[in-house]
Image: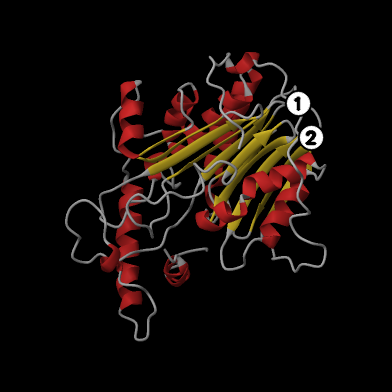
Amino acid sequence: MQLRPLVVLAAALACGPPPAPKDSLPVPSDSRRPPAPKDTSPVPPDIAPPDSPARELPIRTGAEVPSGPLVVTHAGVGSPLSDADGAERAAAAGGDVLASGGSALDAAIAAAVVLEDDPRYNAGTGANIRLDGRTIQLDASLMTDDGRFAAVAAIERVKNPIRAARLVLDSPHVLLVGEGATRFAHKLGLPDEVPRSPQAEAKYAARMKRLREVIETPGTQEPDWRIYWNYPGEMPPDMVAWRYGGDTVGAVARTADHRFAATLSTGGTSVTLYGRVGDVPIYGAGLFAGPAGAVACTGHGEEIIRQALARTVYQALAAGTPAREAVARAAGAFDPRWDVGLIAVDRNGWGVAATQPMAHGHVP
């Protein structure tokens, strides 16, 4: 299916700043893992050849921190810097877990939960409402440096999908989707609740208003999304589509003894059909972790999948590229039609880079 109309629509409707197998044996406690195996993944060429033109990056930061625990968070590419307080609180929550002796995974999950509970961000409570004005479908994933990965996709009626992904980690499977994921989460004790918020309602109304203005513009190239309608129930009379605001939230963590983990959670893009799955629950796309570090991405999901972006950046870390430089190269070389943001930690420090403003936080 051609996705170009989604890209055109996203550009036109801007309302603001712009395989490692899973072990089926019982899993030991997160904080009592054996040493991580030596990384043997093939290392690709540099993400951006030396003579490649690089994009301007309004967000490019990081530091060398060769010892001690680290947590870095992001609130999604395009999230305003004025909302960075939530990302900082999330990083602090993860830092508290590490300070009390928790694992890197425990810390990354704690940070993700804080981000999911902040209605300003497109995850959990603040997740985007879909085209029908009712549906909210969520994706989340996690990965540890010993190769364990778990995810949920298109899950509904769960406030904190990252907790559902954690439950999948202890199951016989790697990825659960749709109604099966929802039933699984409820069966194992997560509350049955729709994560809807006044902020999400307001974003929905604003996008619908802006949509009408764009669709009625003479010569518009926007598709008539009624042709592709595949949601349960009747189509709202004034529905066609709208653009997203904010994106995936994520966290990466490092313990003092250099163990790593990453988490991601998202409400998905608003310009999407029912059941669409982006990069978050795809292995190696939205996040990756290994003995050399951890990476988490945000941005245009289809392109992130095509590039296997997180794993590509991780392989740069494994080859010795510092986290700060690895994420900047990846962001600068990303297809200029779309935006992207990345965070990473390695054995010697951390890095953040994005092609648009992106609220983020870190501890220390």
Q: Please provide percent x and percent y for residue 292.
A: 75, 34
Q: Does residue 30 lie above or below 81 as drawn?
A: above
- Residue drawn at (32%, 44%), measured in percent from left and top? 197
In the rendered structure, which amino acid carries the disc numbered 2? Val
For the residue labelled by badge 2, is the local secondary structure a helix, a strand or a loop? loop
Neighbour tally class for label 2: few under 14, some 14-19, many 20 plus, Cα within 10 Å: some
Q: Is residue 262 left or right of residue 34?
A: left
Disc ID at residue 181: none
**C-beta proximity under 8 Å, tags 1 and 2:** yes
Q: x%, y% of residue 73?
A: 60, 40
Please tell me which residue is depicted at 59% across the width and 41% down the height of the picture.
Answer: 287
Where residue 3 sits: x, y (%)?
45, 65
Residue 330 appears in which quarter of the rendering? bottom right
* Figure quadrant of the N terminus: bottom left
Q: Nearer the viewer, residue 95 or 154?
A: 154
How far apart are the alpha carbons under marks 1 and 2? 7 Å
Q: Residues within 10 Å of mark 1 (few under 14, many from 20)?
A: some
Which amino acid lies under the numbered mark 1 shown in the image of this protein? Answer: Gly
- Left or right, 89 with respect to 71, comes to left
Q: Quadrant of residue 100 in the image?
A: top right
The answer to whether residue 331 of the structure is visible from this angle is yes
Residue 118 shows in this picture: no
Instruction: Name the disc covering residue 68, or none.
Output: 1
Q: Is residue 201 above or below residue 170?
A: below
In the image, taking residue 244 as reference, residue 65 lies left or right, namely right
Disc 1 on helix, strand or loop?
loop
Image coords of residue 309 (percent x, y): 63, 50
Determine which residue is flagged by label 2. Answer: 65
